[in-house]
Amino acid sequence: MDFGTQIKKIRINSKLTQEQLAQKLNVSRQTISSWENNRNLPDLQMVVQIAQTFNLSLDQLILGDNTMTNKLVNDGSEVRKAKMNLISIILLTIAAICFLAKAFIGQPVVDSNGMLHEPFFLIPIGYLFLLSGVIGLLIALVKKITKK
């Protein structure tokens, strides 16, 4: 429900005309009309005043019924799911980069001082990222299956 519909619903439930509501809020009738028709929105101070006038919380005033609240909660969970999937894909990509880097670097090299140079750390790090990414995707899959 949009704010205009919400303010109109509150006004009608309170059995007020636009003129009477305008007088309560010290604004013009045209201002009330523009709010109800979504041409303008009140500033934050006015929203607080409206909530106090009708003894409503700001959530009730702005969000209205629970359908909007439920939509916001569902949208938030969808964003979290998308972030989890993105993180898993990033981890798998890093794992692939580690394995490719190890493959391109090739064999260990011993320099003239007898020092061994080998990027041995790439393989364990690659497996760590691979395991983390697969676990993340499995968790997302299990959550999706259990929700159905």
Image (spheres, rainbow, N blue to C red):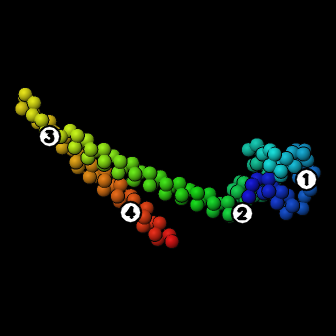
Query: Which marked residue is nearer to the observer: mark 1 or mark 4?
Result: 4
Q: Tally the marks.
A: 4
Which of the two discs, 1 and 4, labels the residue nearer the N terminus?
1
Residue wearing tag 4: 138
Query: Which marked residue is nearer to the observer: mark 3 or mark 4?
Result: 3
Q: Residue furthest top?
A: 112
Q: Secondary structure at mark 4?
A: helix
Calculate the distance from the C-alpha at mark 4 to the C-alpha at mark 2: 36 Å
Q: Secondary structure at mark 3?
A: loop
Q: Amino acid at mark 3?
A: Gln
Q: Tell me the quarter of the picture where residue 9 sits.
A: bottom right
Query: Which marked residue is nearer to the observer: mark 4 or mark 2?
Result: 4
Which of the two discs, 1 and 3, labels the residue nearer the N terminus?
1
Query: Which marked residue is nearer to the observer: mark 1 or mark 3?
Result: 3
117 over 124 or under it: above or below: above
138 over 108 or under it: above or below: below
Cβ–Cβ under 8 Å for marks 4 and 2 = no
- Which numbered circle lies on residue 107? 3
Residue wearing tag 2: 65
Cβ–Cβ under 8 Å for marks 1 and 4 = no
Residue wearing tag 1: 18
Q: Tell me the quarter of the picture where residue 101 sits.
A: top left
